[in-house]
């Protein structure tokens, strides 16, 4: 039993050193939900291209078609360098009614 004390001490020191080295290397990037409402399907490709250029990652989460020729898409995005200004460009695109960006941590519970 006493032979395991040095092993426990050395193991604890090594695990602590690994934690100290990697604690500052891990970046948690919280995703955002981008909800865009528009009234013409002709902008879908340009909207997708614009999001792809300005986000690190993006994925389409939902697309809705509503009466009155209204459409809504929801993307999960990870922004580059906390650049949230691109939402202003999206909202100024022709046929876009609104653009909303929400912080999202993976669940919808309050």
Image: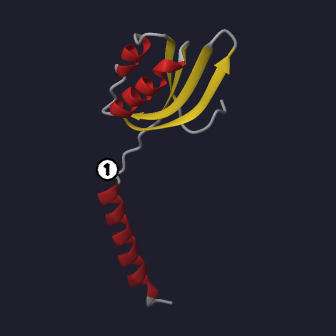
Residue under circle 1?
Answer: 24
Q: Which corner quadrant holds the C terminus?
A: top right
At mark 1, the secondary structure is: loop
> Could you tell me which residue is drawn at 41 percent across and 13 percent down?
93
- State left or right for residue 5 relative to residue 61: left
**In which image quadrant can residue 30 be found?**
top left
**In which image quadrant can residue 56 be found?**
top left
Front-most of 75 and 48? 48
Q: Where is residue 90? Give x, y as percent.
A: 41, 17
- State left or right for residue 62 relative to residue 67: left
Q: Residue furthest right?
A: 67
> Could you tell me which residue is drawn at 52 percent across and 31 percent down?
75
Q: Where is residue 52? Give x, y as percent.
A: 38, 34
Q: Where is residue 103? Give x, y as percent.
A: 50, 28
- State left or right for residue 80 relative to residue 66: left
- 81 over 13 or under it: above or below: above
> Could you tell me which residue is drawn at 70 percent across and 12 percent down?
67
- 46 over 94 or under it: above or below: below
Front-most of 31 and 98? 98
- 44 over 16 or under it: above or below: above
Q: Where is residue 50? Give x, y as percent.
A: 37, 26
């Amino acid at each position: 039993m006493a032979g395991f004390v040095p092993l426990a001490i050395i193991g604890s020191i090594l695990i602590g050193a690994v934690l100290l080295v990697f604690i500052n290397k891990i970046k948690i990037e919280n995703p955002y939900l981008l909800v865009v409402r528009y009234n013409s399907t002709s902008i879908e490709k340009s909207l997708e291209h614009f999001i792809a250029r300005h986000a690190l990652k993006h994925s389409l989460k939902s697309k809705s078609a509503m009466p009155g020729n209204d459409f809504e898409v929801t993307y999960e995005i990870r922004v580059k360098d906390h650049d949230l200004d691109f939402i202003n460009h999206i909202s100024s695109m022709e046929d876009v009614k609104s653009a909303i960006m929400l912080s999202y941590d993976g669940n919808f519970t309050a």
